Amino acid sequence: MDAQRALLDELMGAARNLTEEERKGYKETTWDDKEVCGFYMVRFCPHDLFVNTRSDLGPCPKIHDPKLKESFEGSPRHDSYVPKFEADLAHFCEKLVMDLDRRVRRGRERLDQDVEVPAPPPVPAEKSEQLSVLEEKIKNLLEQVEALGEAGKVDEAEALMRKVDVLNAEKTFLTQQPQNDKLLMLAQEKKMALCETCGSFLVANDVIERTQSHVTGKQHIGYGMVRDFLAEFKEAKEKAREEERLAREKEAEERRKQREKEVESRRRRSGSDDRDRDRGRDRDRERDRYRDQDRERSRERNGRGSREGGRGLDWKYNSTRNGSRDRYRERNRSRSRSPSRRSHRRSP
């Protein structure tokens, strides 16, 4: 019925039986709805692995729809949702494996423990008398067998030995005591083995058909899928963590090389600047030296010119001054000798 219903849903849609009024408020289910099983979308749902087995988890409470799974696989958001769904499935599978491993440990301890068989209880008086009679008969028959053997009567001796065997069997039956059911069960389990994959008890050295039947059973295959998925998931996670670590180391190495290049570039620029400053200082010192030399030459020239020019000016000034004084005296003398000035002075 479920398969037919799924086929009709695929052909006619899940809303095929709804009325027009119900269709108005109907919302079509998509693969990213909370009601859809993400385990089924990405890998497998553990609820489907152990149906009708001792480890049956019951029906899955979420939707399993092949059409939605196809829609998920063709969605552009597929790659972004796969890690989340796989992580949720791994978390669920880890719980299953933890419970299974606890059962395996308990089964292993049960097989490894020593079974202490208690001492047999005392034989009742009635059985004790029977055992005494049997032992006496066995003793007499053994003596007869020995005598016949010495006489060379082998056939008769073998016939008596068969009687001895029958009496010994009766004696063994009387001496055996019924064992406790638990002791019998543990003694039987001592001859059994434990499947490490699914935790089932197996008969040790059983026939190949039964072993093959167990290996191909739902429980063994289901737990094998769960364990394989967990191993694959952890390996992929470890690989991704290692790749991330290598990427961080590569990035750090590139940053270190970049810093070294920047330091080397600054060092080169600093060395070039130092050389430029040294050349500038050399040029400045050379220029200062030439300037000092020019200044010294100028001072020497100015010093000689000042001494010579000073004497010339003093001589010229003195000559001019003396000449003016002589001209003034000469003019006064000529005036004093003039008749007009003499007559003018006398008229008063």
Image (spheres, rainbow, N blue to C red):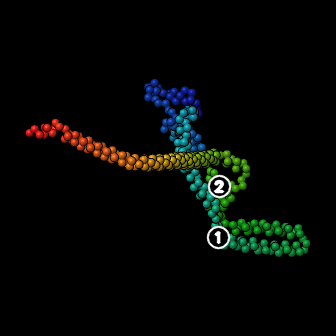
Provide the residue designation for mark 2.
Answer: 194
Q: Position of residue 254 (x, y in %)?
A: 56, 46
Q: Position of residue 73 (x, y in %)?
A: 57, 34
Left or right, 287 with respect to 66, comes to left
Q: Nearer the viewer, residue 312 or 173?
A: 312
Amino acid marked by disc 2: Leu
Q: Position of residue 144 (x, y in %)?
A: 84, 74
Q: Nearer the viewer, mark 2 or mark 1?
A: 2
Q: Residues within 10 Å of mark 2 (few under 14, many from 20)?
A: some
Q: Quadrant of the N terminus?
A: top right
Q: Is residue 270 visible?
A: no
- x 89%, y 69%: residue: 154
Q: Nearer the viewer, residue 167 or 223?
A: 223
Provide the residue designation for mark 1.
Answer: 119
Q: Residues within 10 Å of mark 1 (few under 14, many from 20)?
A: few
Instruction: Look at the numbered disc 2 and give the secondary structure of its residue.
Output: strand
Instruction: Look at the numbered disc 1 and give the secondary structure of its residue.
Output: loop
- x 53%, y 28%: residue: 13
Q: Position of residue 122 (x, y in %)?
A: 65, 72
Q: Nearer the viewer, residue 42 or 238?
A: 238
- x 63%, y 68%: residue: 118
Q: Nearer the viewer, residue 245 or 255?
A: 255
Amino acid marked by disc 1: Ala
Q: Earlier in the sequence, mark 2 or mark 1?
A: 1
Q: Cα distance, mark 2 to mark 1?
A: 30 Å
